[in-house]
Image: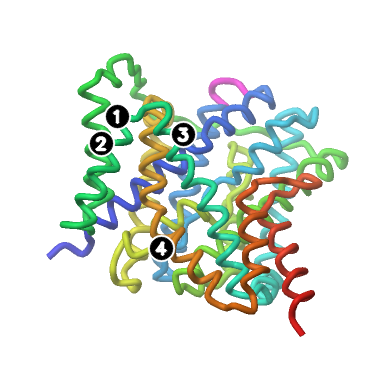
Amino acid sequence: MLPFKLSHVVAGFIAVLVGYTSSVAIIFQAIDRLGATEAQANSWMLVLGVGMGLSTLLLSVTSRMPVLTAWSTPGAALIALGTGATLPEATGAFLFCAVLLIVTGLGGWFDRLARLVPDSLANAMLAGILFSFGIKIFDGISSNPVLVGIMVATYLAMRRYAPRYAIAVVFLAGLTHVAVTGGFADAALPLSLARPSFVMPEFQPAVLIGLGLPLYLVTMSSQNMPGVATLRADGFEPRIGRAITVTGVFSLLLAPFGGYAFNLAAITAAICTGPDADEDPRTRWKAGVFTGIFYVIVGLMGAAVIGLFLVLPQALVLTIAALALLGSIGNSLSAALTDKTDREAALVTFMATASGFGLMGIGAPFWALLFGLIVRFALRR
């Protein structure tokens, strides 16, 4: 008997697929904004993939929980907006952010802060994050109705007769349709291993404050906080301080090569923390292991695998992500609205998160929790 299930492999692969296709374009924009060479760009993709893979493997194996890490997507967007910093100056800011992450993890204050957030609001925030991702399936319907129709029909049939293999078969059905219709005909995939390229950091106080500090703030508020909520929504209680410390250490080691910031994952983690990954919560950590393995492979293959991800129709990626997250969205919404006394506060949190707005450079999840806590305080005796 195999020590793992097919659902572990599928969940890990889908998590990596969603992680790359949903935000790799933002990484490319950040790289371009800093004026990186082609070798430096390949180094970024190498260390980001390997860094996410090794940190996910380390945290999942040692904690026996599906603790996934990711690159900081809002952090990449912040870099892409441009601050006028050179690549060496930005690298110094990345190291500054990494030190702040390590201090946060070792200090333990984030653990205590996270425990102050009621479960109803944490679940509402998670539901809002996943909901805004899940509804993009309807964008796929408008752009490629035949592909989405085939995948949805396959999903419904498999959920009725073989639910454990639903997502795997849906993905294969989508790939088959794309291949039959010639979707891979023009794919050009360079087969070469990426190599690290070191950048000597420069520490400019203005850049440390103007880029390093905001990078830390958006990573903590828009990534680590939802990441904790994702794990707790499915009954996992990780050592948050230790997890953040690990992401900070990986950021510190890999920043000179392009690993600008690592953090706890939320959307991709939800694919591995729910029952679709494994009916037994005690062995879902194996889905995290396969996620880590796939991340390392993608990082080493660099341009080839990323090129393959970019060739896939957007409708396929949006549909597989929405269907894989369907159960997590429903569970989070249900948990958020169970307590009638917190229902209005949870709804405010959910709507604010789903809106995707930002304020003062900080993403919606942080403000949504703040608004929800204000409403909860105002309405409770």
Q: Depth check: give the residue in front, 323 or 190.
A: 323
For marks 2 and 1, give the CA distance. 6 Å
Which residue is found at the position 59% from the left and 77% from the top? 340
Residue assigned mark 3: 139
Magenta span main SS: helix
Q: Nearer the viewer, residue 314 or 206?
A: 314
The answer for how far apart the CA atoms under marks 2 and 3 are is 15 Å
- Under tag 3, what secondary structure? helix
Quote the CA–CA distance across marks 4 and 3: 26 Å
Residue that badge 4 annotates: 273
Q: Amino acid at mark 2?
A: Ile
Circles 2, 1 touching at the beta carbon (< 8 Å): yes
Comparing 121 with 16, the one in front is 121
Q: Residue at x 36, y 41 (%)?
A: 297
**Residue plotted at (25% across, 47% down):** 168
Label 4: which secondary element: helix
Amino acid at circle 1: Val
| Vertical order, 266 against 280 (above or below) | above
Q: Residues within 10 Å of mark 3 (few under 14, many from 20)?
A: some
* Residue 46 position within the rendered picture, expressed as x and y whole percent measured from the top left: 48, 36
Residue 12 colored magenta?
no
Q: Amino acid at mark 4?
A: Thr
Work out which quarter of the rendered image holds the N terminus and state it: bottom left
Task: Identify the disc placed on residue 146.
Answer: 1
Instruction: Classify mark 4: residues with Cα within 10 Å, few (<14), some (14-19) or many (20+).
Output: many
Please tell me whether residue 303 is drawn above or below residue 242 in the rendered image.
above
User: How many circles with numbers are drawn on the protein?
Assistant: 4
Q: Which residues are magenta?
A: 36-40
Q: Which residue is mark 2?
A: 150
